[in-house]
Image: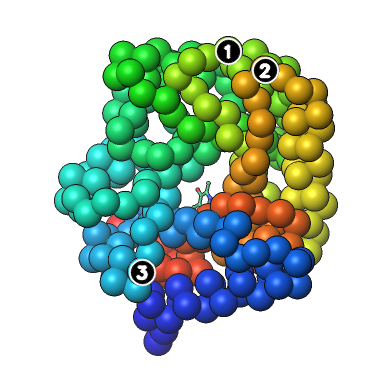
Amino acid sequence: MSTIADNLAYVRKNISDACIRAGRDPKEVTLIAVSKTKPVSDIREAMSAGQTVFGENKVQELRTKTTEITEPLSWHMIGHLQLNKVKYLPGMVDMIHSVDNMALAEQIEKECAKKDTVMNILCEVNMAGEESKFGLAPSEVKDFVKSISGFNHIKVKGLMTVAPATDDPESNRVYFKDMKKLMVDINNEKIDNIKLSELSMGMTNDYTIAVEEGATFVRVGTGIFGARNYAV
Ligand SMILES: *Cc1c(COP(=O)(O)O)cnc(C)c1O
């Protein structure tokens, strides 16, 4: 059986190969190890293999894990977020990837103002228009970004998407391409305070394709830690 260290080495190699194919510098891509549902011991194994950036999708789990692991790591909140949980995130995470509504943006602004800090955020976009998914419709993103561009305690860094689960990852390429175009379009609007540079896209099944299409963050869970068991 492969270890977490083996898996990490394999994923890093795939990212670097995808960068080379696309004429990109591998340093442009940050691998987020998605440790949701996995024990602290697994995170420690990944840390021993040099991993410093981790993603979680639940605030309570983030709180527990960041209490147990006090080494300086970069934590990313990648999951759907309830308003009453926002207060825990300033100082705990480096970025929130899942901002898709005004009420949430206002809450982040308010909580970060209280703590005199600025939160990096990504706007989550439902590129494939899936019924079951969170995220703004692509057509809504520009106005949304505009409407939060004046917030002093939020820095909009880019866009995030969760592409469809599919047996044919190649079929997700179009969504990654379109999200990059969307970022370029928004930058061309020259909105005050807005210069987007980050694209959080690609998961275990499709991260190499996402890297070929310009991802700057890939979020890989299963490919590093193995399958999740939600029954436990
Ligand atoms: C769980 C999760 C991932 C990782 O998914 P894998 O398929 O296990 O790599 C990535 N992004 C988000 C938002 C997730 O919730």
Q: Is residue 144 visible?
A: no
Q: Position of residue 30 (x, y in %)?
A: 53, 57
Type of the residue with mark 1: Gly
Q: Is residue 127 visible?
A: yes
Does the residue at mark 2 contact the one at mark 1 (Cβ under 8 Å)? Answer: yes
> Which residue has dot 1 on it?
150
Does the residue at mark 2 contact the one at mark 3 (Cβ under 8 Å)? Answer: no
Q: Nearer the viewer, residue 63 or 192?
A: 192
Cα–Cα gap, marks 2 and 1 = 8 Å
Structural crowding at the residue carrying mark 3, measured as other residues with C-alpha within 10 Å and reported as few (<14), some (14–19) or many (≥20): few
Cα–Cα gap, marks 3 and 1 = 37 Å
Does the residue at mark 3 contact the one at mark 1 (Cβ under 8 Å)? Answer: no
| Callout 3: SS | loop
Q: Position of residue 61 (x, y in %)?
A: 29, 44
| Callout 2: SS | loop
Q: Residue at x 62, y 21 (%)?
A: 193
Disc assigned to residue 50: 3
Type of the residue with mark 3: Gly
Seen in the picture, residue 4 relative to 31 is either above or below; the reply is below
| Callout 1: SS | loop
> Which residue has dot 2 on it?
192
Seen in the picture, residue 28 relative to 127 is either above or below; the reply is below
In this rendering, which labeled residue sits more in front, label 2 or label 3? 2
